[in-house]
Each structure stands twice: as structure tokens, then as C-alpha cells.
Amino acid sequence: MIKSFDEVLEKVRSNGIKKVAVAVAQDEPVLEAVYEAKKLGIADAVLVGDKDKILYCAKTLNIDVSDFEIIHESNNQAAALKAVELVSSKKADMVMKGLVDTATFLRAVLDKEKGLRTGKILSHVAVFDVPALQRIILVSDAAMNIAPDLMTKKQILENAVQVAKAIGIDTPKVAVVAAVEVVNPDMQPTLDAAALSKMNDRGQIKGCIVDGPLAIDNALSEEAAKHKGIVSIVAGKSDVILVPNIETGNVMYKTLTYTSNSKNGGILSGAAAPVILTSRADSNESKLYSIALASLVAANK
Ligand SMILES: CCCC(=O)SCCNC(=O)CCNC(=O)[C@H](O)C(C)(C)COP(=O)(O)OP(=O)(O)OC[C@H]1O[C@@H](n2cnc3c(N)ncnc32)[C@H](O)[C@@H]1OP(=O)(O)O
């Protein structure tokens, strides 16, 4: 089982070089990440975006991008679609979000003709290496599905489990979180959590152990679970945190990013090819880890 992002970087070096199509590449952290990925022998890149701005960013960073193919497209929507199309037409292996808002990027990924649909739900999986927890946790969905219903949550859960398995967690423990750890009919997330847990008991969700509802304290801390008298294999040992909606996931993602000294990467799961999706404000390091994560998951499909 992989215990840190440094191990992810090490492992994917043997997977061979993948070509990343970057959507709206005029962004310093993105350029630094793809430059570093190339240096490490993980990935090459096609930079789609405003060529003058891309070259200006590269000059500011003092990095040489002359080895990368640049496709000039100054319109963000068109650049996102072009980058996605490079992947769906197999001219690149994975697509990465650059300096473009998430909804525009995701609409290109979902494009009926040129996109990366599979007929399944696509969802975002964030992987955090949190020093205080001394383990890797996955958080889903912080970025794509806004207010998933029960069956969408089931697919989001299964997508996250697939990523967990790719990083070597054979039977991931999934905590379906809510505001409380008891079923309250006035709180829909607690009802969905209980249903997902029972679906797992009855074999409708396989390959993982699901428990919920759990509040985030007892999902993450054994001590908190013990204190509240919760007896559960998942409590305090969760690998995957399934959040009830995008607000919860996004707040958790950004709180962990800015306060926990953690390392993180983010990708979409369920698409026809790897999709690298981080926040525009995330560091170049996080973008590099996301490229490595995408490569690892692709190799395990
Ligand atoms: C974590 C760090 C990064 C961030 O901080 S991200 C910030 C927050 N995220 C966002 O702002 C994006 C949130 N999501 C959205 O805006 C929207 O759901 C999204 C993905 C753009 C799609 O919205 P719309 O374009 O309005 O489309 P829609 O809901 O009417 O659906 C259009 C077609 O796409 C399909 N679709 C939508 N979401 C899907 C999914 N998750 N998996 C698979 N298919 C999906 C949907 O079924 C529909 O298909 P069809 O056209 O009926 O065949």
C-alpha cells in the first residue's frame, strides 16, 4: 500500500511517459508541474491555450517550454474542448485543467461528441497525505456532483473505491459522513448514509467496507469514536470520506489544503481517460502529484 505521494511519484516512473493535454495552459503552477513531470520522466505535455501568455509565464518562471507542443487557442471554452478532444482522439493520454473555471472544463469533459463520457457518473476524488493522520485519505466529491442523490452517491463511492484500490488499499474503509452519527429523518445525508451502509452489507456495493452515518470526528479519530461509544470497523480508520454534497467536500478539500500541511492530488474517476482536476489556486506540487496520481490510476484500470 502506498503511504505517501513521494511513493506515488516513484511508482509511476516505471509506467512510462504519458502525454498530458493541458487545457488553458497559461498558468505558472501548471507549467511548473508539467515541466517537473517531464524532468522526472513521468509525462510530456501538449499545451493548449494562449501562446503568447504561455510563453510569458514560462519566461517569468525561467523554464524552457520549447520541447512542448503548443496549440494556440485564446478562447478558454474552445481550448478546454480542444485539450479534451486530444485525449478522446488518442493523441494524448490524459487531460489537465489549467487556468479555466471548473464548470467550463467539466462541460468540455462531458461534451457528447468530443468528451470522455462512459455512461457512468464521473466524480472527483481528492487524495490527501495528512501528516496528523499518518495515513492517506480520499475525499469525494468536492468538485463535480453538486447535490448527489442516493444512487449517484453509490457511483461516487464506487469511483472513489477504484482510486483507493489503485493506490494499494485492497479493501477500503468508507465513512459516509453527515453532521451526526445517528439516523435523523430530517437530515437526508444520514438516511443516504444508512442506506449505503446497508447496500454494502447486502452486497449491492462490493470491494469495500462502508459505514455511516458517521460525523467527521469519529470518521477520522478512533479516540472520538470511542468517546461516543461507536463500535465500527470504519470509525477512526476510514480511507475514504464520502461527503453529502459539493459544499461539504469543497470546504473539507480547501481546509485540509490550507491548514493541515498535507500533500494532495485530485482527479476525476469514471471517465474514459484520466482527468486531472485541481483548484486553480493549488500549488505546482499538488498539480504534479495529480499528474502522478492520474498515471497510477490509469495503469491499474
Ligand atoms: C476541488 C478543487 C476544484 C474546485 O474547487 S471545483 C469548484 C466547484 N465545482 C464546480 O463549480 C463544478 C460543479 N458542477 C457543475 O457546475 C455542473 O454539475 C457541471 C459538471 C458543469 C454540469 O452541469 P451542466 O453543464 O449544467 O450540465 P447538466 O447537469 O445539465 O448535465 C449535462 C449533461 O451532462 C451529464 N452529467 C452531468 N454531470 C455528470 C456527471 N457527474 N457524470 C456523468 N454525466 C454527467 C448529464 O447527465 C447531462 O447529460 P445529457 O445531456 O442529459 O445526456
Image: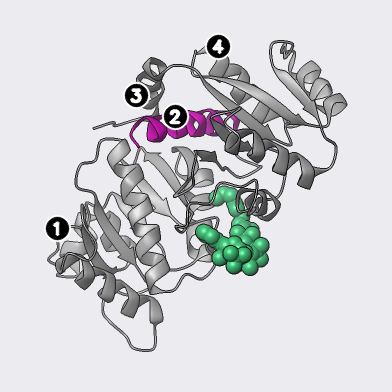
Provide the secondary structure element on which disc 2 rests: helix
Q: CA distance from mark 3 to mark 1?
A: 27 Å
Q: CA distance from mark 3 to mark 4?
A: 17 Å
- Res 183 quadrant in image: bottom left
Whether residues under marks 2 and 4 lie with C-beta atoms below 8 angstroms apart, the answer is no
Q: Is residue 27 left or right of residue 249?
A: right
Q: Amino acid at mark 2?
A: Ser
Q: Residues within 10 Å of mark 3 (few under 14, many from 20)?
A: few
- Nearest to the eye among marks 2 and 3: give it: 2
Q: Is residue 98 above or below residue 142?
A: above
- Nearest to the eye among marks 4 and 1: give it: 4
Residue placed under numbered mark 3 in the picture = 7
- The structure residue drawn at horizontal position 45% and vertical position 46%, both measured from the top left corner, is 126
Q: Residues within 10 Å of mark 2 (few under 14, many from 20)?
A: many
Q: Is residue 189 above or below residue 26?
A: below
Q: Residue 295, which numbered label?
A: 2
Quadrant of the rendered image holding ligand 1: bottom right
Q: Position of residue 46 (x, y in %)?
A: 67, 24
Q: Is residue 154 above or below residue 22?
A: below
Q: CA distance from mark 2 to mark 1?
A: 31 Å
Badge 4 or badge 1: first in the primary sequence = 4
Q: Which residues are magenta?
A: 283-301
Whether residues under marks 3 and 1 lie with C-beta atoms below 8 angstroms apart, the answer is no
Membership of 30 in magenta stretch: no
Provide the secondary structure element on which disc 3 rests: helix
Residue placed under numbered mark 4 in the picture = 39
Q: CA distance from mark 2 to mark 3?
A: 13 Å
Residue placed under numbered mark 1 in the picture = 233
Q: Amino acid at mark 4?
A: Lys
Q: Position of residue 35 (x, y in %)?
A: 62, 18
- Res 198 quadrant in image: bottom left
